[in-house]
Image (tube, grey):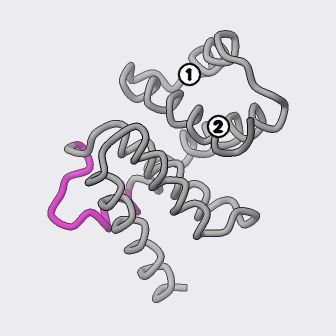
Amino acid sequence: MGRRYARESTMKLLYQMEMNSDFSQDIINLFFENNSFDEGEKKYIEESIHTIVENIEEIDSHIQENIRGWDLHRLTKIDLCTLRIALYEMIYREDIPIEVSINEAIEIAKKYSTEESAKFINGVLGGFVRRRGKNG
């Protein structure tokens, strides 16, 4: 199905992990047992989840820096997971253009959250890009 399906599936898995406060390999294995993916999708999901979980504090700190007047824990879990995936791509995946990561995050938010969330996510990611540009 492609990269968008893999991103949406990553968001669903990350959401499940966040809701259960369980970031173990068992949850990942169960997710793959209950869903069907081609090799490329599975590779993207595994790499994404492992990198996000290993670097969650750094990723969350970038989110916190760019959500003016908000606390990270007040974000909806779907929006938080969507932001984590986009920032993972923007920080750790040089093969994915930043514009693609932002656009995909907006589309995921429109589909699984709200139009307001899509605008919010666009603003947060735009803020990250601007800060990163200033700081190299």
> Where in the figure is residue 43, as x and y percent of width and height?
78, 36
Instruction: In the rendered view, tell whether residue 50 sits above or below residue 131.
Output: above
The residue beneath circle 1 is 24
Q: Nearer the viewer, residue 12 or 106?
A: 106
Residue at left 73%, top 19%? 36
Task: Give the magenta part as a residue range.
Answer: 61-73
Residue at left 39%, top 19%? 20
Q: Nearer the viewer, residue 27 or 115?
A: 115
Of the numbered discs 1 and 2, the one sitting upstream in the chain is 2
Callout 2, which amino acid? Tyr
Q: Between marks 1 and 2, how big is the CA–CA gap?
A: 22 Å
Q: Quadrant of the N terminus?
A: top right
Q: Would you call the spot at circle 2 few (<14 residues within 10 Å), some (14-19), or many (20 or more)?
A: some
Residue at left 58%, top 70%? 99
The label number, if any, that marks residue 82 in the structure image: none
Tag nearer the camera, 1 or 2:
2
Secondary structure category for the residue under label 1: loop
Q: Would you call the spot at circle 1 few (<14 residues within 10 Å), some (14-19), or many (20 or more)?
A: few
Residue at left 43%, top 41%? 111
The residue beneath circle 2 is 5
> Where in the figure is residue 76, as x and y percent of width and height?
27, 40
Callout 1, which amino acid? Ser
